Image (spheres, helix red, strand yellow):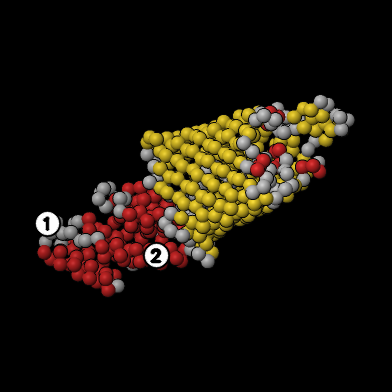
C-alpha cells in the first residue's frame, strides 16, 4: 500500500540544458522589459536605445559601452540598471551583473525579476545553493505566471523543492497485482497470506495553510487511500490520516513540528490506529547538497484481535542528498524502536517489539526518454526484544529478520496537472523462524493529478 501522503520529489535536469535555457530567457526578458528614461538628458536616452539595438544584434561589448554612456550622461533608471546587468551577464562578468541586479532587488516592482536573474548569475558563477535561494524568492514574490514557471523550472533542475503553496492536493487511480496480500503494509508485523491477487487503488491527499505564510505557518494535512482486491476481499484496505503542523522556511533551513492521527481498516475491521508526534528538519548545503532529519513518536492501539500491537513506536532517521550530474543521489539510515504489548497465548509467547536498523539509497533521474525515474534500495535488520516461547513454552528462540528490497517508479507528464506512472517493488524477508519468511512483489499502473493554489 502506498503512503497516505505522497510528497513531491525534487527534480534535477542536465546542466547543459539549464545553461542553454538561461541564455534564451535572458534575451527574451531584455526584449520585453522596456527602458524608461525619467528626467534624463536626450543624449542619455539615445545612448540607451543604441545599447538595446546592439544587444539585440548580439554585439554585447557595443551594448555595454552604450549603456555606460547613458549612465554617464545622467540616465539612472531601473530599466537601464537591468539592461546593464543582463549585458554583464552575457559577457560573463558575473560579479558586475550581480551588483546591478542586487541594486534592483529592494524595488518591489523589479524584485521578482531581479531575484530570478540573481539566480541565473549565481548558477553560472558556480553557486547552486545561492541560486536556489534566489529562485525561491522570485517564485514567492512574482505575480507573473510566466516568471513563476521559469523560477519553478530552474528550481526543479537544480534539485530544489518549490515553496509550499497555500493549498495543494493530489489524487490518483491505479490498478495492479500484489503477489502476497497482507494485513499490514509491513508484512513482518502481522504475517503474509502467501496469496496473490489483482487490485484497484485510489488515493487522495491535501494540505492547506491555515495561518501564516511560507516563511512560517500552520498547515493542516489529510489523506485517504482505498485498495480493493479482486478476490481476497478480506484484505481490502482503507486508510485515513489527519494532521496539523507548524512549518518554517528560513532559506537554508526548513523545519516542521506537528502530529497526525492514522487509522487503518482491513476487510472492514480496524487493524490499528496511531497518534504520532512528528519533527522534521532540512538543511541545504553548497553544491546542491542537503541534510535531512526526522523523529517520530507514536502511540499505537490495535483493533479487535490485534491488541498485541498496542504500545509505542519511535523512529529516528537521517539522510543526505547529493547532486551528481543528471541525477540526485540520497543515502540514509533509520532506527526504529518498538515497545508493544506482544502476544501471550497460554504458555507460548510471541514478541511484536523489534528494534530495527535500515540503510537505504535512492537515485532520481529527471529525464529518461521523457520519463522521470526513481529507484530505491533498502536493507533492514530486525532483532526482537524478547525471545519467543514455542512448543508449549518448551522452546525459546529470539526472532531475527533480514529484509531487503527495491522499489522503482517512472512517471510521465501528460499535461500541466496530470501524470501517468508505473510502480514496481520487490521485498524479501528472511527470518530464523521459517514461518516469517516471505517475498512480495507489486506492480501498479495509474494516473495522478496534482493541484496547487
Circle nearer the viewer, 1 or 2: 2
Left or right side of 15 for 306: right
Residue corresponding to mark 2? 21
| Residue 347 x %, y % | 83, 26
- Observer-nearest of 207 and 28: 207
| Residue 126 x %, y % | 44, 59
Question: Which residue is painted at 58% across and 34% down in the image?
Answer: 263
> Helix, strand or loop at disc 1?
loop
Question: Which residue is painted at 58% across and 39% down in the image?
Answer: 238
> Helix, strand or loop at disc 2?
helix
Question: Which residue is painted at 49% across and 43% down in the image?
Answer: 205
Residue 276, image quadrant: top right
Q: Is residue 9 above or below residue 414?
A: above
Asked if residue 438 shows in the view, the reply is yes
Residue corresponding to mark 1? 39
Pointer 2 local density, CA inside 10 Å: few below 14, some 14–19, many at least 20? some
All told, the count of numbered labels is 2
Amino acid at each position: 500500500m502506498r503512503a497516505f501522503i505522497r510528497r513531491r520529489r525534487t527534480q534535477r535536469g542536465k546542466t547543459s540544458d539549464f545553461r542553454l535555457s538561461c541564455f534564451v530567457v535572458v534575451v527574451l526578458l531584455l526584449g520585453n522589459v522596456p527602458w524608461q528614461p525619467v528626467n534624463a538628458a536626450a543624449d542619455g536616452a539615445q545612448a540607451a536605445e543604441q545599447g538595446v539595438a546592439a544587444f539585440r544584434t548580439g554585439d554585447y561589448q557595443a551594448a555595454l559601452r552604450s549603456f555606460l554612456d547613458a549612465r554617464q550622461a545622467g540616465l539612472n533608471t531601473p530599466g537601464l540598471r537591468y539592461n546593464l546587468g543582463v549585458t554583464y551577464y552575457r559577457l560573463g562578468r558575473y560579479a558586475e551583473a550581480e551588483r546591478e541586479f542586487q541594486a534592483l532587488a529592494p524595488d518591489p516592482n523589479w524584485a521578482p525579476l531581479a531575484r530570478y536573474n540573481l539566480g541565473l548569475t549565481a548558477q553560472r558563477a558556480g553557486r547552486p545553493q545561492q541560486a536556489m535561494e534566489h529562485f525561491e524568492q522570485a517564485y514567492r514574490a512574482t505575480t507573473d505566471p510566466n516568471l513563476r514557471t521559469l523560477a519553478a523550472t530552474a528550481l526543479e533542475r537544480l534539485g530544489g523543492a518549490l515553496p509550499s503553496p497555500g493549498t495543494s492536493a493530489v489524487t490518483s487511480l491505479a490498478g495492479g497485482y500484489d503477489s502476497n496480500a497482507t494485513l499490514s503494509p509491513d508484512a513482518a508485523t502481522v504475517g503474509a497470506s502467501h496469496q496473490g491477487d489483482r487490485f484497484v487503488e485510489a488515493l487522495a491527499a491535501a494540505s492547506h495553510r491555515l495561518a501564516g505564510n511560507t516563511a512560517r505557518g500552520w498547515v493542516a494535512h489529510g489523506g485517504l487511500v482505498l485498495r480493493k482486491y479482486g478476490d481476497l476481499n478480506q484484505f481490502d484496505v482503507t486508510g485515513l490520516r489527519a494532521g496539523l503542523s507548524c512549518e518554517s522556511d528560513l532559506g537554508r533551513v526548513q523545519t516542521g513540528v506537528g502530529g497526525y492521527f492514522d487509522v487503518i481498516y482491513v476487510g472492514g475491521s480496524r487493524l490499528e490506529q496511531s497518534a504520532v508526534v512528528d519533527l522534521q528538519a532540512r538543511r541545504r548545503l553548497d553544491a546542491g547538497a542537503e541534510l535531512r532529519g526526522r523523529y517520530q513518536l507514536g502511540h499505537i492501539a490495535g483493533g479487535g484481535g490485534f491488541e498485541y500491537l498496542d504500545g509505542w513506536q519511535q523512529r529516528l532517521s537521517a539522510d543526505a542528498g547529493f547532486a551528481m550530474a543528471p541525477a540526485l543521489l540520497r543515502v540514509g539510515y533509520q532506527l526504529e524502536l518498538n515497545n508493544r504489548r506482544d502476544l501471550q497465548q497460554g504458555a507460548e509467547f510471541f514478541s511484536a517489539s523489534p528494534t530495527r536498523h535500515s540503510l537505504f539509497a535512492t537515485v532520481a533521474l529527471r529525464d529518461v526518454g521523457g520519463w522521470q525515474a526513481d529507484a530505491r534500495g533498502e536493507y533492514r535488520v530486525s532483532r526482537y526484544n524478547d525471545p519467543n516461547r514455542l512448543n508449549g513454552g518448551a522452546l525459546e528462540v529470539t526472532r531475527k529478520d533480514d529484509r531487503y528490497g527495491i522499489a522503482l517508479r517512472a512517471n510521465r507528464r501528460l499535461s500541466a496537472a496530470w501524470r501517468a506512472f508505473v510502480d514496481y517493488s520487490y521485498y524479501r524477508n528472511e527470518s530464523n523462524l521459517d514461518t516469517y519468511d516471505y517475498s512480495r512483489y507489486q506492480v501498479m499502473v495509474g494516473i495522478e493529478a496534482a493541484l496547487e493554489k
